[in-house]
Image (cartoon, grey):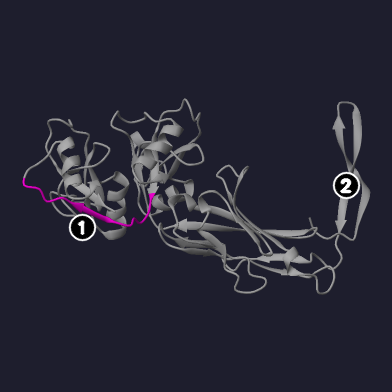
Amino acid sequence: MKNLLCLVLIPLCWAAHHGNSTVYLDRIIHIHENGPRLVVEVDQTKVISHRGGNATLPCKFQHESITAGSPSHKIRIKWTKLTSDYLKEIDVFVSMGHHKRTYGSYQGRVYLQGASENDASLVITDITLEDYGRYKCEVIEGLEDDTAIISLDLQGVVYPFFPRMGRYNLNFHEAQQACQDQDAIIASFDQLYDAWRLGLDWCNAGWLSDGSVQYPITNPREQCGGKHTVPGVRNYGYRDKDKGRYDVFCFTSNFKGRFYYLIHPTKLTYDEAVQACINDGAQIAKVGQMYSAWKLLAYDRCDGGWLADGSVRYPISKPRRRCSPNEAAVRFVGFPDKKHKLYGVYCYKA
């Protein structure tokens, strides 16, 4: 609410019609004296960081206390995170004077920058994939309040994923879990759109974090919406999260550890590959870790190797004959027979 000088009820000159009846409505007009006394300002609306890094979400406020010398501890600062449907907010941090509180997964990782008396900027440390999104800074003093929205973006990579059982086999909840199992989160539309602008082309529809199903096309063709259509992100709309069955687009960012191809004297079955990584003090790598190493570290290896989901892939950052002649990409070999097919293995050591 803003500080009000008075409230005036004025009959409107327009009316709402119900059948043969006409109902005249009143409108409340808020008259401010010299404008609002509390204003929240931000000098940038988007901050970019990465998993494991830190970020400062800027937020400052200007205020005139109702009485001169009014104590500043009456000012309440609240940070929340907006969900994809914008109907629910997740509590992050609240401060009022010496009283401060953090919530949920943010405990021990967030605090106010406090560079000045009017600085409400929020510092987030050891950023996780789940921290990505839009945050609201709200400052309250008595009956006055104002807000601002800041986005936290992460450097990373979007990749399409489907399980061993085949394409179009995941409902929304299974899609979320599939991404988490592969060191990722389900991607947002903004992340998919950015990936499309960078050249991502994928003809199979997949879930996004808002419950919609979409897919990015940079090279229009008959089997992907039509040869004469324009490039873009094709949208199936919002689908039933329990009954709908699609692939999923996952997003991952930097990791703290070492991703590598294990040099081994022989090729391995899946179980042998898992054990070989364990023997080397590591674990079999996940799909998201391969994509992160490929995209963010320019990892390049022309050897197909087992990954945790039972697939065999290899990352090529330098296209060349017999590896990936036309593009830098994570090449997908398939889901071979785990007991009889022999390949190398990619490991991850935290």
**Image coordinates for residue 26, horizontal then vertical, percent:** 90, 44
SS for tag 1? loop
In-image side of 306 versus 70 (left or right): left
Task: Kindly report the secondary structure that dominates the magenta region of the rendered protein.
Answer: loop
- Magenta residues? 252-265
> Which residue is drawn at the image coordinates 18% and 36% (left, top)?
271
Position in image of residue 318 (x %, y %): 20, 57
The residue type indicated by label 2 comes to Arg
User: From the viewer's perspective, is 350 left or right of 28?
Assistant: left
Disc 1 marks which residue?
318
Q: Position of residue 237 (x, y in %)?
A: 51, 35
Amino acid under disc 1: Lys
| Mark drawn on residue 27 | 2
- C-alpha separation, residue under disc 1 versus residue under disc 2: 65 Å
Comes first in the chain, label 1 or label 2:
2
Q: Position of residue 72 (x, y in %)?
A: 74, 69
- Residue 288 lies, with reference to residue 154, above or below; the image says above
> Looking at the image, which residue is at 27% across and 49% down?
290
Answer left or right for 321 relative to 31: left
- Dot 2 falls on a residue whose secondary structure is strand
Query: How crowded is the residue under tag 1: few (<14 C-alpha within 10 Å), some, or many (20+)?
Result: some
Side of 325 where 180 appears, left or right: right
Regarding residue 158, the answer to whether it shows in the image is yes
